[in-house]
Amino acid sequence: MSYSIATLLTRNLQEVFGENDPARRRAAVQELYTEDGVFYDPSKGAYRGRDDIDRIAGDLRATHLDFRYQPIAEPEETGNGGRVRWVAGRPGEAPAYAGTDFIIARDGRIAALYLFFDKLP
């Protein structure tokens, strides 16, 4: 199945990095990423392939199971790339951190995800 860049950005934020259930997260990774997809984390390096991306998303999620990721702007698209700005934190509290996800899409799936941490708005 092929998805728009805006859909990929939104679903990745919620269903991959924001998902507590390992089976649902794994299914989302399988659906949203190319087989050779890469996730670039500025503090930890590159994770290659669906298995690595699923593992690191689960590891990151385990550090803050109660956090929610909220887009703070509509996803933006240009060519085969796009970005979405977001904040994360516990519901009802001030955000703990902020970031921007930038993706390169191929055939309606995420081929590369670049994470940038931002200053809180």
Image (cartoon, rainbow, N blue to C red):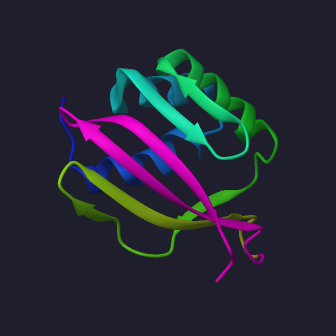
Q: Residue furthest right?
A: 63
- Part of the protein shown in magenta: 93-121
Location of the C terminus by quadrant is: bottom right
Q: Position of residue 47 (x, y in %)?
A: 58, 26
Residue 103 inside the magenta-drawn segment: yes
The picture quadrant where one finds residue 90 is: bottom right
The residue at 39%/60% (across/down) is 83
Measuring 72% from the left and 37% from the top, which residue is drawn there? 44
Q: Quadrant of residue 31?
A: top left
Q: Is residue 33 above or below residue 91?
A: above
| Residue 20 part of the magenta segment | no
The front one of 26 and 102 is: 102
Specify whether 99 is left or right of 74: right
The image shows residue 12 at horizontal and vertical percentages of 45, 44
Question: As displayed, is residue 93 above or below residue 79?
Answer: below
* Side of 12 where 53 appears, left or right: right
Total number of numbered labels?
0
For the residue pair 71 and 117, the one nearer the viewer reads as 117
User: Which residue: 73% across, 64% down?
Assistant: 89
Q: Residue at x 78, y 37 (%)?
A: 62
Name, please, the residue furthest toward the bottom: 121
Quarter of the image containing the N terminus?
top left
Q: Which secondary structure type mostly characterizes the magenta part of the structure?
A: strand
Q: Position of residue 79 (x, y in %)?
A: 17, 54
